[in-house]
């Protein structure tokens, strides 16, 4: 790992220089943070599961014609991605009231929203990712109107697809966060889907029991977070049956063997 040049380290991922110009390697950590990193911990095996889940979802979205940064998975914790200029906006899509929406507006968690809501947050840890409106994005030039149209269109398409994908495995897609980037080709750029789609940035509730199968287990001290991520991966068909409780992680394996 140390051979490679580290480009960026985030809360849950590290980006390394890729093998070819215009590529990066995205490494998924087990580290978990919440409430703007005020709460810190690890979820054993999370990085392996998120790498696999995000690969699966991005591959399916790519198949639908949604452009993404994903190129291919390299190993248990890494994937090769296209280098993009990240648009400094977190796009949150909501189907059911929960989290900050419920808190801010006093709407009971679990209430189906009459229509899907798309919200924007300015990506700035020091400011705690404040919610913003289109007006702020235009005013401060964080993205052009054309880019925002593409982002909103893609967010709706991703939501439609993911709602169906998760409904098919008995999971309600309550809300999720997306990030987008600019892919530069000469003097022109186009918007593509970046970052990851995993239980770290989605609220996923079991359709029959309403059990939370996402990072809220960690945020709200519910316990069983590793099992919840495994359950999502298992239902997506990404864990061989019988191995649901043992995420094969070579690194962990080596550590246990003391090598
Ligand atoms: P809320 O605004 O209710 O806290 O979050 C809405 C949705 O976006 C949730 O599914 C949450 O996981 C996701 N989300 C919002 N901000 C972040 C963030 O900074 N990191 C991650 N991993 N997810 C986020």
Image (tube, helix red, strand yellow):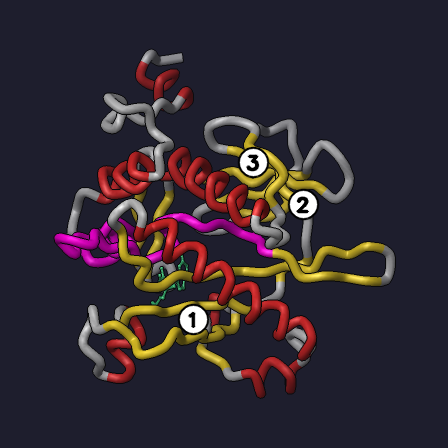
Where is mark 3, residue-wise? 79
Tell which quarter ligand 1 is in.
bottom left
Which label sits on residue 128? Answer: 1
Q: Return the x and y of residue 223 as percentages of the image width and height.
A: 17, 46
> Is disc 1 placed on a helix, strand or loop?
loop
> Is disc 2 placed on a helix, strand or loop?
strand
Q: Return the x and y of residue 149 as percentages of the image width and height.
A: 62, 74
Q: Return the x and y of residue 132 as percentages of the image width and height.
A: 49, 81
Magenta region, mostly helix, strand or loop? loop
Specify whether 151 is left or right of 31: right
Magenta span? 193-221
Which label sits on residue 82? Answer: 2
- Indicate the quadrant containing the C terminus: top left, top right, bottom left or bottom right: top left
Q: Quadrant of residue 101?
A: bottom left
Residue sitting at x 55%, y 32%:
73
Q: CA distance from mark 1 to mark 2?
A: 27 Å
User: Which circle's residue, 1 or 2, is located before the other in the chain?
Assistant: 2
Q: CA distance from mark 2 to mark 3?
A: 10 Å
């Amino acid at each position: 790992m140390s051979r490679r040049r580290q480009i960026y380290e985030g809360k849950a991922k590290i980006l390394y220089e890729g093998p070819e110009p215009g590529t990066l390697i995205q490494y998924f950590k087990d580290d978990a943070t919440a409430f703007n990193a005020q709460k810190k911990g690890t979820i054993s095996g999370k990085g392996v599961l998120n790498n696999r889940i995000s690969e699966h979802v991005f591959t399916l979205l790519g198949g639908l014609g949604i452009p993404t940064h994903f190129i291919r998975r390299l190993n248990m914790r890494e994937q090769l991605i296209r280098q993009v200029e990240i648009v400094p906006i977190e796009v949150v899509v909501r189907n059911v009231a929960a989290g900050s929406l419920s808190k801010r507006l006093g709407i009971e968690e679990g209430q189906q929203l009459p229509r899907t809501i798309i919200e924007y947050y300015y990506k700035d840890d020091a400011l705690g990712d404040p919610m913003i409106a289109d007006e702020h994005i235009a005013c401060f030039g964080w993205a052009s109107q054309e880019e925002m149209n593409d982002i909103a269109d893609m967010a709706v398409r991703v939501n439609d697809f993911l709602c169906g994908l998760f409904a098919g495995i008995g999971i309600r897609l309550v809300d999720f966060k997306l990030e987008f980037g600019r892919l530069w080709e000469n003097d022109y750029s186009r918007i593509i889907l970046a970052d990851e789609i995993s239980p770290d940035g989605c609220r996923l509730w079991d359709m029959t029991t309403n059990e939370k199968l996402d990072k809220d287990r960690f945020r709200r001290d519910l316990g069983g977070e590793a099992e919840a991520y495994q359950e999502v991966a298992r239902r997506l068909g990404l864990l061989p049956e019988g191995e649901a409780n043992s995420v094969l992680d070579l690194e962990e394996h080596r550590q246990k063997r003391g090598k």
